[in-house]
Image (tube, grey):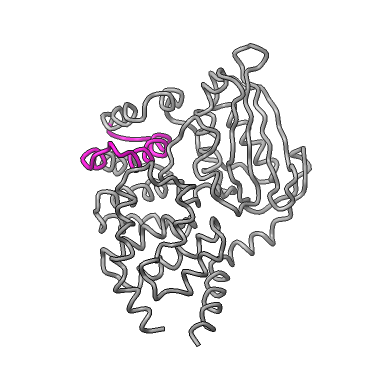
Amino acid sequence: MISILYPIVIIFLLVAHYQPFIQDWVSVVPKQSTSPQDSVITSNVDLLLYKIIASDSYSKRYLKEIKFLMMQYQLYNPKINLVNKESPSFYLSLFKDDKYWPGGRQLKNSDYSLNIKISRHDKSNKIYFTLSILDNMSRKLTYRYSTVIDPLNLSRSIENVSRKISDVFNIKSNNCYSPKVNLAQLTKAPHLNSLEMVIKKGYASIDEVNYLTPFVLSDPSIKDTLIQQWINVLESSNSIFQRDIDVWLSLLFYRIRDFDNSERYFIRSDSLKMIDNSFLYLVRSDVQLYLRDESMFLEYYMKSLVTLTNLVPAKYVYHRISNLRNFEECLSPWKELDLVLKLDRIDSYWTDSFSSYCMRSSSYLENEKKTI
């Protein structure tokens, strides 16, 4: 009887979980295009920022700033769902001058993928910039756009490119974002130097928050006292992007083991209704373990498993759900992500925390086993 019920439970969870996305997919009618005027998409769009390639040393000087600006402009376009933030590695990934955006490599499901190539323009001080958008269902090029941008005014250039992206998808560009700090200075300085400078200032812009918080969360050299100072800065920074700041605060409080405040900011941000991220689900399930809320722990634990089907073959998730009796393997689907997430390169707090997760959750999982 139990073996019969497992597939039904899994199907129910998957349908309930993905129903909003199925509805969005039906309402979107993509059309191959190389011109913004030809586009007919009118719904919200799932967009993955995938790769940015610099073909020479000159253009690579500006890769990180371009990469960060592109993410910020898409992140705060209300009609674009930036799929990168649904990757479990997104919140622990530093901005580097490599070719991948944070979260770009892991995800399987996205309507469209965006790639950029940059190179020095005819030995001048300008940059030749080519953007391409791929329809992931048809695997065909939807749009390509080339222009020359000024590295001394990248914000204006990337803002114009972002308008082109909105035109491609026929969506209004109601973007309320604009850079508030010197991004060239922010992205070129060592992370720790920038962090100490902002802490001394006492408040942070959304650029500084999004750029520096992954460093605070993931770098092994960061002590709890410095994390608390960064928390104080974020709590003092009023922003129209407060929901994102609250997500960061929930993770920062978790990092210093203040689980009550972590849960408070999870609730305040309402993030898990907006961001379908298996890592956030897993962290919040762990918070519930420490708060001894069995019902909420099981809810977020199961959601973390179901959401992993965006990243790993569903058979691994199915195997775990159909073998709830074996609590020692409660995180077995996550093992499939180890090579992708490179967990050994981040602060050991995260790996140590989840290494004991299964044992700490055993009583709840054992209770659940007895009731099935």
Q: Most extreme residue toward the left, as rendered?
A: 225
Point out the image quarter for the C terminus: bottom left
Horizontally, is 46 left or right of 182 in the view? Answer: right
Q: Would residue 209 be counted in the magenta stretch?
A: yes
Q: What stretch is highlighted in magenta?
A: 202-229
Tell how many labels.
Answer: 0
Q: Position of residue 290 (x, y in %)?
A: 26, 63
Q: Where is residue 334 in the image (x, y as percent from the top left)?
A: 45, 57
Horizontally, is 109 left or right of 102 in the view? Answer: right
Q: Most extreme residue toward the top, as rendered?
A: 123
Horizontally, is 319 left or right of 198 in the view? Answer: right
Q: Which residue is nearer to you in this view: 21 or 57?
A: 57
Instruction: Tell me the residue at 71%/32% (across/down).
Output: 145
Q: Which residue is nearer to you in this view: 177 or 15?
A: 15
Horizontally, is 123 left or right of 84 in the view? Answer: right
Q: Position of residue 40 (x, y in %)?
A: 75, 49
Q: Position of residue 54 (x, y in %)?
A: 59, 26
Instruction: Tell me the residue at 26%/57% (across/down).
Output: 259
Q: Would residue 312 be counted in the magenta stretch?
A: no
